Image: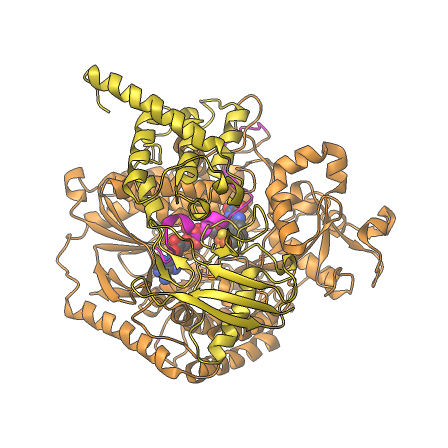
Amino acid sequence: MNLDSRCPSGPIEQKWDKAKFEMKLVNPANKRKYSVIVVGSGLAGGAAAATLGELGYNVSCFCFQDSPRRAHSIAAQGGINAAKNYQNDGDSVFRLFYDTVKGGDFRAREANVYRLAEVSVHIIDQCVAQGVPFAREYGGVLANRSFGGAQVSRTFYARGQTGQQLLLGCYQALERQVGAGRVAMYYRHEMLDLVVIDGRARGIITRDLVSGKIAAYVADAVVLATGGYGNVFFLSTNAKGSNATAIWRAYKKGAGFGNPCFTQIHPTCIPVSGDYQSKLTLMSESLRNDGRIWVPKEKGDKRTPSQIPEAERDYYLERRYPSFGNLSPRDIASRAAKMVCDDGLGVGPTGLGVYLEFAEAIGRLGRTTIEERYGNLFEMYERITGEDPYSSPMRIFPAVHYTMGGLWVDYNLQSTIPGLFVLGEANFSDHGANRLGASALMQGLADGYFVIPYTLGHYLAGVKPGNLTPDDPEVLAAQRAVEDKTRQLLAIKGKRSVDSIHRELGKVLWEYCGMARNRAGLEHAIAKIPEIREEFWKNVNVTGENAEMNQALEKAGRVADFLELGELLCRDALIREESCGGHFREEYQTEEGEAVRNDDKFCHAAVWEYKGENQAPERHIEPLEFEYVHLAQRSYK
Amino acid sequence: MKLVLNIWRQKNQNSRGGMVRYELDGVNEHMSFLEMLDVLNEQLTEKGEDPVTFEHDCREGICGCCGFMINGVAHGPHRGTTVCQLHMRHFRDGEELWLEPWRAAAFPVLKDLLVDRAAFDRIIAAGGFISVNTGSAQDANTIAVQKHCAELAMDAAACIGCGACVAACPNASASLFVGAKISHLALLPQGQPERSRRALNMVAQMQQEVFGSCTNIGECEAVCPKGVKLENIARMNREYIKAAWAYREEAAAGGGG
Ligand SMILES: Cc1cc2nc3c(=O)[nH]c(=O)nc-3n(C[C@H](O)[C@H](O)[C@H](O)COP(=O)(O)OP(=O)(O)OC[C@H]3O[C@@H](n4cnc5c(N)ncnc54)[C@H](O)[C@@H]3O)c2cc1C
Ligand code: FES
């Protein structure tokens, strides 16, 4: 497996300019001869499809929802980072780069992260020009807030609906291209396989979710921007349809999978309330700007929160991490919550919860200001729990939220399969072992608006357009394979629902590959998951048929892939014998419970290569070098 | 608690649908409405029956996927709430409910409670944007925007495109949806250059789709889960009339439309 990162040489602040200059160009008249498939219409895919359309390529964009505007990016709440330094508080491209590398616990590629910080400033410009109604100050300039892992205010936001507004800007740009006939939009189409011919990505196989028709689409290059795979855990903050199918199929066709075990558990989510729970709801990290996290000092304290006096509360983040306090990075805040709950100090009916309180902020700033900043989040909390967070603290608990792992890509965002590019949360990303808040939106848009238009052009300039049709024998063979698998799923007609098996997988992963991991647990999970997989293929009941709208079949296909991916997650976690970022191995911690990295053995990205059915996958590495941000134990104390 | 559910079942766009009655026991008050339907579907699957199809994704009230009528009210009885965020604590033990898909000629039913809302995308494609190619933007703070305008624009931009407004309107008008987008962009300085064209083109597309006309009934505002206000429709009408005049003047002066 070739893991050449293709990073340009030279000083880090000149690399991207140099790369852009050295890239080959496709002349304007030739662009429309090249066809490009973009799978995904979230921030990454939507931005890519719109921009490539503007440039004049012949673009087809796919999403499984009924409209590109519904991609899961819509749900992002808190904000988007950019190194604008509008606050004059010491921010810079270098500082955003530094914070991101450090926040990721030194497991990301420096050159990519630097580029991300560099283009972040253009993202805000572009979005404002599109009409994104960011929050503003009375003087008419843009407002900022702070997010975890940073000591500057660089987060731009649109109330608690930043993702929605960014995505609508992007969607509108995309629809403009659809209206102009430059992008063909295929909604309610799910990609079920990748077509690789002569070692190059040349198309995809999709199922039309209304008619069930399975069809092939061919192109000169394929871009995957299909989001994260957090739903492998069943319960997560992701939308119900978020899935790994597109990247998993690509993995099985030869794309390397980077750092699958790097998953992010978000500290502030509404706790689980019962077995029927279908998903978990995030309470944005922005709340930690003004909210204070605490638990009672005494075990089993059954008093209501307002009855517990100040002196009997433990504001454990402020105590343990005085300089970052409630704004400690997510991995640290989540683990701290787990530790207090493990010690029996957790609150709420299950004991799996901590308080997030606003009384102090309401006293200081007044209720109106708090309402203005977080009104919709407070309402959402009230709707779900039936409790009023203005009068009593929220109860929160960590939940699976984001996946830093994903398909490995080089500096040009190209996977190990030539012609297959991966953007947004779907790639193994610039976030290393832990993503900082408000950086995923930034990365998705950076990839889609500002990176792929250059790097894809460079690739296309080196290949001949066209020369493949959907009735090519190799394409037809890929299509038949998908049809066969669909038939197979429908033929089982066993006893169990897809969801019940998915839940079972999720429980195993949360227990053994969640917030804390250890050898024995991971080995157990690696033995257990194949059993669940077997149960699935023997005993699942996928009702109905293919030639109709069939949500059970859609779910079954996704869960079949999760059942394979889950095992890879555990394998990756088992081999990485260190704790870094979101990957916490209990064997490797300090006495105070802080993560201990092993830079001698693990200062690399792990990249997995598929070796065939029932064969162990092979682990490769891309060594990481830190020239600008020196390797150091992370400290937020 | 126990519920009686009468649910619209329809195999596909071309078949006739009808109400089917289900009894569901063991509903927990902390469940969301969709989690309650998940439980029903789990039971149907166990019996080998076809589960009820409904659209959903985020289950956080923001993607705009979900929505159907509960006892004749779009998104159900709780104001300002999508059906995915509606919780069972708002219902009584033994209650009987009627669930139906959005009813509008422009939103054909594809299966059970799920409809086709592609007409909304076509309206946006007709003009619901600001034409600014990637890379051509100036620094974001160059143009100051009054906080008040930004807030009003945000109020309108909060629309999630669920279609409840259309479903609730006796005329099946899409005016609230279209008015919200026209307002959002007309309220911002960035939206000015295309202001007239946008209003004309979006309204024209709305009329081409089979939506009805607005007669100021206000049902749309009442059911909107995001509190998008009727004043957006008034603004759309003003924008449209102004644009129609501007268009005539421009055309008379030999300019484009
Ligand atoms: C609740 C929540 C809040 C968040 N808040 C923030 C925040 O405040 N700031 C921040 O920076 N980040 C935040 N994040 C993270 C961020 O939203 C995501 O990482 C980011 O939006 C992902 O964008 P994307 O374009 O990569 O993927 P998505 O937006 O998930 O888009 C995926 C697209 O791929 C399509 N797709 C997927 N699979 C297939 C398939 N098989 N076939 C066809 N199409 C497919 C989907 O239809 C969709 O269009 C949040 C995440 C969540 C869950
Ligand atoms: S499922 Fe997204 S709004 Fe209800």
Question: Please, is residue A153 above or below residue A566 in the view?
Answer: above
Chain A: colour as depicted: orange
From this viewpoint, is residue B181 visible? yes
| Relative image position of residue A457 (x, y in whole percent) | 25, 45
**Is residue A227 part of the magenta span, yes or no?**
no
Q: Is residue A280 left or right of residue B213?
A: right
Residue at point 21% right, 56% down? A219
From this viewpoint, is residue A128 visible? no
- B252 vs A619, nearest the viewer: B252
Q: Is residue B175 left or right of residue A203?
A: right
Chain B: colour as depicted: yellow
Question: Please, is residue B64 above or below residue A612 in the view?
Answer: above
Query: Magenta region: which residues?
Result: A63-88
Residue at point 21% right, 51% down? A35
Instruction: Give the main secondary structure, helix, strand or loop, of the magenta stretch.
Output: loop
- A524 vs A169, nearest the viewer: A169
